[in-house]
C-alpha cells in the first residue's frame, strides 16, 4: 500500500515527512526520526504525561490548542495541524517562555523527567486562558494538569507556576500567520489514493465507502486505546482508517429532545456539551481521565471500544442514550446497552461503524417530575485513574415518588450494563431511606463482579450498595460526604 505524506506546521514553517508507517506513534517519530528528545517516554500508556505535546488546529472559531499524549498518538493523525514540543517554546535569544520561566521561579522541577510534559500542559493552559484574557484559578490549574504526574516535588510548586506565569511578560503566537499556513494545508490535502496505508476521509460518504471496501483496516479516532495495542501489545496495522477528519462526525447538534454527538467529537468537548444541560456532571467529567486523554480521545471511540470499565457508558446508559450505527446504504438506531454482546464485543458488522451518540435532554415537565442525576467513580487514585466501579443513577422524582429510574453500571460485568432489577425496585416507590436501602440490596445482588488488581468482588458489591445510600443522602442535601467536597474546601483554605 502507498504511504501518505504527513504535513504539519512547526516553529512557523511547514514540515513534510514521507514513508512513515501507519502505526508509528508521534513520540517515536519525534524522538527517533526528528531527534526531539525533550519529549520523554514514561509509561507509554497516556497516564504519566511526560510525553505531552501541544497541537494547534484551525477551527471556525479560530485556533484551538490541545495538550495530548504523544506516546499513544499516531503520527499521521497530526497531518494538517500545528505542533509544539518543549524545544519550541524558548525565544531565539534563549529567553524562556512564561510557562518555563514560572517553573524556574517557583522551583517546580526536581529530577526533571516529567518537567517537559508539565511545561507543555502549562503552555496549552497559557494559550487557552492567559492569551484569551482569562485568569487561571487554582482549581483550573489542577484540572488542566490532571494528566501530568510528578513523583518528586509534589504539586504545590507546579500549581504555583501555573498561576505565576500569567503575571510574567506576555509571549504570543502569531495566530494570523499560523492560521494562513493551516488553511493552506487544508486547501491542498495529500492524495495517496483510496488504497493508502493511512486513510483519513473528510466526508461521511467517503468514510462509509472505505469502511465497506476495507473492513479489515483498523478503525481509529483518538487512539487512546488503540495506541496501547501498539505500545504494549506491539501490534502492527498494515492499514488504518481514521474517522477524525470527517466533518459530519465532528459536530455536536442540538435537537428539541436530544443532543447528537458525532463519533469524532473529543471527550473534552462532548462532556462540555453534556455539562451545559447538567452542570452536576462537571466533577465526574474532570475525573474521567487526564486532560490530554480527554483532548485526544473521542466519545464514539470510548463507547465503541466497550470496555467494562469505561466510564462514559454507565452515564450514557443512565441518560437513556442511543447509538446510530451506519454502513453504506443504511443505518440503525439502538439503545446503547444493546450494543454489547460480550467482553469488547458488539453487534456491529465488519462494514459498519458507530456514527453518533444520541443523548436525551433533561425533561422540563412538571408532570414528569424533576431529574435527579448522580454518577460516581471509585478508583484508587482520585485523578487520572481507571475505575474499579462506576455507578450512574438518574431518577425522575415527583411529589417525593420515583416516576422513572435509569441505572448504568461499570466494572461489575463483562460489559457496561443496565441494572434492570434495581430500576424496578425504585420505580413507583416513595423516595425514602427505606426505598434506597431496599434498592441498594437489590443492586448488590444484581451482578457477580470479579476480583482483579483494582478491587475484589466483595468490595465492588459492597460499594455499589453504599453508593446508592450516598445518592439518597445527597438527594436530601447532605454535604461533605464525597472527595470533591473536601478538595473544594482545601482550595478555599
Image (spheres, rainbow, N blue to C red):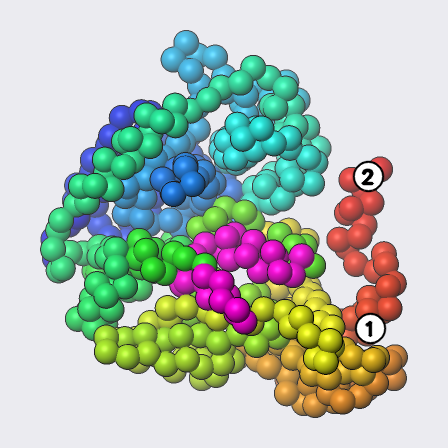
> Mark 2 and 1 residues: CB-CB less than 8 Å, in contact?
no
Label 2 vs 1, first from the N-terminus: 1
In this picture, is 327 found above or below 428?
above
Residue nearest the viewer, comparing 4 with 182: 182
The answer for how far apart the CA atoms under marks 2 and 1 are is 27 Å
> What are the residue bounds of the magenta stretch?
253-279
Label 1 sits on residue? 472
At 40% from the left and 74% from the top, the residue drawn is 324
In the picture, the quarter occupied by the N terminus is bottom left
Determine whether, in the image, residue 312 is placed left or right of residue 446: left
At 52% from the left and 35% from the top, the residue drawn is 128
Look at the image and tell me whether residue 50 can be seen.
Answer: yes
Residue nearest the viewer, comparing 207 with 143: 207
The picture quadrant where one finds residue 408 is: bottom right
Q: Give the crowd class for mark 2: few <14, some 14-19, many >=20 residues within 10 Å.
A: few
At 11% from the left and 55% from the top, the residue drawn is 193
The picture quadrant where one finds residue 205 is: bottom left
In the picture, the quarter occupied by the C terminus is top right
Label 2 sits on residue? 492
Residue nearest the viewer, comparing 390 with 155: 390
In the rendering, at what x and y percent does residue 138 appear? 70, 36
In the rendering, at what x and y percent does residue 146 appear? 60, 45
In this picture, is 242 found above or below 330?
above
Q: Does the magenta stretch include residue 260?
A: yes
Q: Does the magenta stretch include residue 121?
A: no
Amino acid at each position: 500500500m502507498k504511504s501518505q505524506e504527513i504535513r504539519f506546521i512547526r516553529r512557523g514553517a511547514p514540515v513534510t515527512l514521507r514513508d512513515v508507517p501507519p502505526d508509528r506513534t508521534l513520540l517515536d517519530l519525534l524522538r527517533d526520526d526528528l531527534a526531539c528528545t525533550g519529549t520523554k517516554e514514561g509509561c507509554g500508556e497516556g497516564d504519566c504525561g511526560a510525553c505531552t505535546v501541544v497541537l494547534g488546529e484551525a477551527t471556525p472559531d479560530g485556533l484551538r490548542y490541545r495538550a495530548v499524549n504523544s506516546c499513544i498518538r499516531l503520527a499521521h493523525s497530526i497531518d494538517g495541524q500545528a505542533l509544539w514540543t518543549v524545544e519550541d517554546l524558548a525565544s531565539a535569544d534563549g529567553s524562556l517562555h512564561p510557562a518555563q520561566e514560572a517553573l524556574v521561579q517557583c522551583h517546580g522541577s526536581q529530577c526533571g523527567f516529567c518537567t517537559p510534559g508539565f511545561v507543555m500542559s502549562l503552555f496549552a493552559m497559557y494559550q487557552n486562558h492567559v492569551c484569551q484574557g482569562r485568569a487561571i484559578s487554582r482549581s483550573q490549574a489542577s484540572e488542566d494538569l490532571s494528566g501530568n504526574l510528578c513523583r518528586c516535588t509534589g504539586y504545590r510548586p507546579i500549581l504555583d507556576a501555573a498561576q505565576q506565569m500569567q503575571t510574567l511578560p506576555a509571549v504570543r503566537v502569531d495566530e494570523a500567520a499560523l492560521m494562513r499556513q493551516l488553511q493552506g494545508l487544508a486547501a491542498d490535502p495529500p492524495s495517496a489514493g483510496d488504497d493508502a496505508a493511512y486513510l483519513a476521509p473528510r466526508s461521511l460518504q467517503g468514510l462509509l465507502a472505505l469502511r465497506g471496501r476495507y473492513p479489515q483496516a483498523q478503525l481509529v479516532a483518538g487512539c487512546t486505546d488503540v495506541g496501547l495495542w501498539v505500545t504494549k501489545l506491539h501490534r502492527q496495522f498494515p492499514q488504518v482508517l481514521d474517522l477524525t477528519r470527517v466533518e459530519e462526525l465532528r459536530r455536536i447538534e442540538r435537537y428539541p429532545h436530544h443532543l447528537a454527538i458525532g463519533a469524532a467529537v473529543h471527550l473534552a468537548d462532548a462532556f462540555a456539551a453534556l455539562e451545559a444541560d447538567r452542570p452536576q456532571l462537571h466533577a465526574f467529567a474532570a475525573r474521567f481521565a487526564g486532560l490530554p486523554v480527554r483532548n485526544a480521545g473521542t466519545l464514539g471511540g470510548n463507547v465503541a471500544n466497550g470496555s467494562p470499565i469505561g466510564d462514559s457508558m454507565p452515564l450514557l446508559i443512565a441518560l437513556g442514550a442511543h447509538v446510530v450505527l451506519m454502513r453504506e446504504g443504511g443505518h440503525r438506531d439502538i439503545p446503547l446497552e444493546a450494543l454489547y454482546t460480550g467482553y469488547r464485543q458488539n453487534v456491529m458488522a465488519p462494514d459498519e461503524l458507530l456514527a453518533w451518540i444520541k443523548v436525551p435532554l433533561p425533561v422540563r415537565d412538571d408532570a414528569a417530575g424533576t431529574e435527579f442525576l448522580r454518577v460516581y467513580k471509585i478508583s484508587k487514585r482520585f485523578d487520572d485513574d481507571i475505575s474499579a466501579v462506576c455507578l450512574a443513577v438518574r431518577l425522575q422524582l415527583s411529589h417525593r415518588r420515583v416516576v422513572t429510574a435509569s441505572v448504568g453500571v461499570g466494572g461489575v460485568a463483562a460489559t457496561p450494563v443496565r441494572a434492570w432489577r434495581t430500576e424496578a425496585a425504585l420505580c413507583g416507590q416513595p423516595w425514602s431511606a427505606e426505598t434506597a436501602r431496599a434498592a441498594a440490596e437489590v443492586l448488590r445482588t444484581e451482578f457477580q463482579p470479579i476480583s482483579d488488581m483494582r478491587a475484589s468482588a466483595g468490595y465492588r458489591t459492597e460499594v455499589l450498595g453504599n453508593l446508592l445510600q450516598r445518592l439518597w443522602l445527597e438527594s436530601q442535601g447532605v454535604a461533605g460526604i464525597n472527595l470533591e467536597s473536601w478538595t473544594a474546601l482545601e482550595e478555599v483554605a
